[in-house]
Image (spheres, helix red, strand yellow):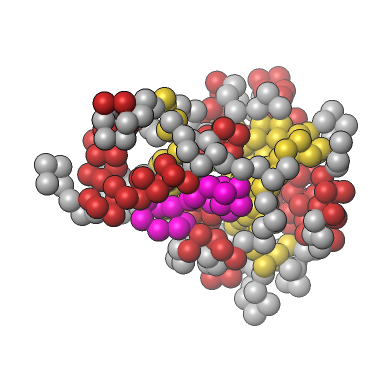
Amino acid sequence: MKRLHQFLREQHTSPELIELIDTLLVACKEVAYLLKQGALAGILGSAGAENIQGETQKKLDVLSNDLLKKTLLSCSLVKGIASEEEDFPVAGNPNGKYLVTFDPLDGSSNIDVNVSVGTIFSILQAPTDLAGDDESAFLQQGSKQVAAGYVLYGPSNILVMTTGKGTHMFTLANTGDFFLTRELVQVPVTTKEFAINMSNQRFWEHAMQSYVDDMLKGEEGPLAKRYNMRWVASMVAEVHRILTRGGIFMYPYDYREPKKPGKLRLMYEGNPMSFLIEQAGGLSTNAYTHIMGIQPKGIHERVAVVLGSKEEVNIALDYHRRLAGSQQGD
Ligand SMILES: O=P(O)(O)OC[C@H]1O[C@](O)(COP(=O)(O)O)[C@@H](O)[C@@H]1O
Ligand SMILES: [Mg+2]
Ligand SMILES: [Mg+2]
């Protein structure tokens, strides 16, 4: 079986990018180790603090953020980092070549119940004229990502990544090495499986309500399909399922907090996941347009997410095109 290193070299990945990915994975392996120990390592429960987005931090949110931050900032290639758990970007080496944004622990609500969680990352080229703690250095469209991926901490620990040459999966062995276990992943074009938090239904836009209503009508409805539903509440686990067997994942805009265009964050959730999905032949949108074409305005900016199997995402887009701005009963 092929080691990650060998694979990346064969893909003509630059030695610097390989070194950076290696560094990042050192921290992810420590997170994986801590998760395996669970209560024995005293890592469960809340940290008793909130992040800048007003979310209660779990102990492991803080621990994994500290691990990733320390490890990445020790690498001379890193000019700056931006994390879900850091209010502002943090500067690294002024001559560093890369910026890294990350969600150190995705699916935090699942830590205490021993369900899959993950680390999501996105790597950008650092502009030479801006400091590593200058927010504007990070505000690049998702289409500019140099590499992106996640490590899923589940029954197996799996790295899924892309450098723009397809999406590939690597499984962590006991030796600490990642081995290539799925090359050139392809998201099936069609699906009958959707993932959405149904409890927010009454807050969605009419277009999304109408689409999901029609899905629930099954064979007798206009979509003429019997759908199945899944909701893990860890985006990494949902995206992993979709990369493995297809599906559509949606965290749409909703009216709960009208000023926020969605729950998920563009720079360290939406963009990296979009890069992975689209490199695997899927589609990733905010229900209207490609996520990777959105010009970010802030490192913690929110985004609506509708991604997965191409045909199904196109159906969702079609509902939004037709019903944009309409109200129930229109
Ligand atoms: O609580 P909900 O509405 O089910 O939201 C679940 C979503 O929130 C997230 O947990 C947000 O990520 P964090 O845990 O990093 O804040 C996603 O992974 C997941 O898709
Ligand atoms: Mg997250
Ligand atoms: Mg998180």
Residue 312 lies, in percent from the top left, at 42, 42
Residue ID at (45%, 58%): 290
Res. 83 in view? no
Residue ID at (71%, 31%): 157
**Residue 274 is covered by the magenta coloring:** yes
Tell me the quarter of the picture where residue 129 sits: bottom right
Residue 142 higher or lower than 316, as above or below: below
Which image quarter is the N terminus in?
Answer: top right
Residue 291 lies, in percent from the top left, at 47, 57
Residue 70 as seen in the image, left or right of residue 328: right
Residue 48 as seen in the image, left or right of residue 320: right
**Residue 292 is covered by the magenta coloring:** no
187 or 196, nearer to the observer = 187
260 or 159, nearer to the observer = 159
Residue 288 lies, in percent from the top left, at 36, 55
241 or 103, nearer to the observer = 241
Residue ID at (56%, 63%): 143
Please give the range of residues in magenta. Answer: 273-291
